Amino acid sequence: MKNYKRYFLTSESVTEGHPDKVCDFISDSILDDCLEQDKNSRVAVETLISNNKVVVAGQITSNAVIDIENIVREKLKEVGYTDAETNMDYKTCDIDINITKQSNDIAIGVDDGGAGDQGIMFGYATDESEDYMPYPISVAHKLAKKLAEVRKKGILPYLKSDGKVQVTVEYVNDMPIRIDTILISAQHSKDIDLATLQKDLIENVILEVVEPDMIDIETKFYINPTGRFVIGGAVADTGVTGRKIIVDTYGGIARHGGGAFSGKDGTKVDRSASYMLRHIAKNIVANGLARKCEIQMSYGIGIQNPLSIYIDCFGTNRIPEGLIIKIIKERFDLTPKGIIDYLKLKEPIYSKTTNYGHFGREGFNWEKIVQI
């Protein structure tokens, strides 16, 4: 068969108790608290957690009055960091705070509506799944979210909040045809045996999420392959804001500009332009202009309009790509201010974006389908 092409693609997701995601959650919660009080807040906050220590650092220029230590402890409690031996204790952990104001040199350009930094951003969409996301990352996120759900609802009360999911999908001629491998590493209490955990996760997580026709007799399941995952969270691993940028976007199947999202307000194009490009790419596919679409834009600090726009539809476009770029420029305001206004990025929505991917989930303006 001359056109037959077979390959395997893998994507990863993590649970809300993964240390990197805890840091993202804290940083975005600080941003939300600032925006609740002052819509024009400029925020760029990073969090680091390790063992029994939390460090929050960055720049905030805002009229908001916030209690960062209280936010940190509340969010640690919310994700299940309640045990100093197995993850971290929100009540007793040490918290260091080092916050300054945004540099006046940056503010000069941002105050006039320019980008808050230079950089390149990508947006991507495909029709291979209902959420217009690559199928492997779509399934991985759903599995990670289900892990949290069965833990919080008490269906599997022995689960802890840390965990990872990895999904490998077999493609033929660029379409997913089956799931080849599902790997889950889930933190658990010390009194549960491995066989019970494996059986419970297959029945209550995997089979509840994955379409039956995507699993076959050759599909491989690896659940806690080391045999034990009791110590996790910040006790076992250091977490840092912005270290899960592939989990946050397209699972490694589309390109990435390198900029993280969490803890940054909308003037930072790493975040706002990436959201806008996802919106545009999704709508190019949803409106039938292409079956797959990747867009790149670049910005210069203090400059309002993007320096470049590039599009690749991988041969699936129904009209010339140059014409699609023309439609994009006519339909959308791609200045930072235009993006912020269009997507309503001054609202305190960001802590909701932290887990299970920033894209492919309903409830965000960049995921809305519009006519173009």
Image (tube, grey):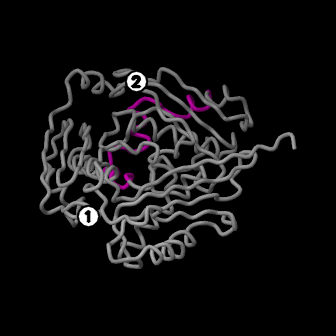
> Is the residue 191 above or below the residue 230 in the image?
below
Mark 1 surroundings within 10 Å by alpha-carbon count, few (fewer than 14), some (14 through 19), many (20 or more): many
Q: Position of residue 169 (x, y in %)?
A: 63, 53
Residue at the spot of label 1: 86
Left or right of 331 on screen, residue 292: right
Mark 2 surroundings within 10 Å by alpha-carbon count, few (fewer than 14), some (14 through 19), many (20 or more): many
**Quadrant into which the C terminus falls:** top right
Q: Quadrant of residue 106?
A: top left
Depth check, front residue: 31 or 88: 88
Q: Position of residue 129 (x, y in %)?
A: 63, 54
User: Marks 2 and 1, how far apart in space?
Assistant: 48 Å
Q: Quadrant of residue 42?
A: top left
Q: Nearer the viewer, mark 2 or mark 1?
A: 1
Q: Is residue 248 magenta?
A: no
**Quadrant into which the N terminus falls:** top right
Residue at the spot of label 2: 304
Dot 1: element: loop
Q: Identity of the amino acid at label 2? A: Gln
Q: Which residues are magenta?
A: 326-354
Left or right of 217 on screen, residue 240: left
Q: Position of residue 30 (x, y in %)?
A: 23, 49
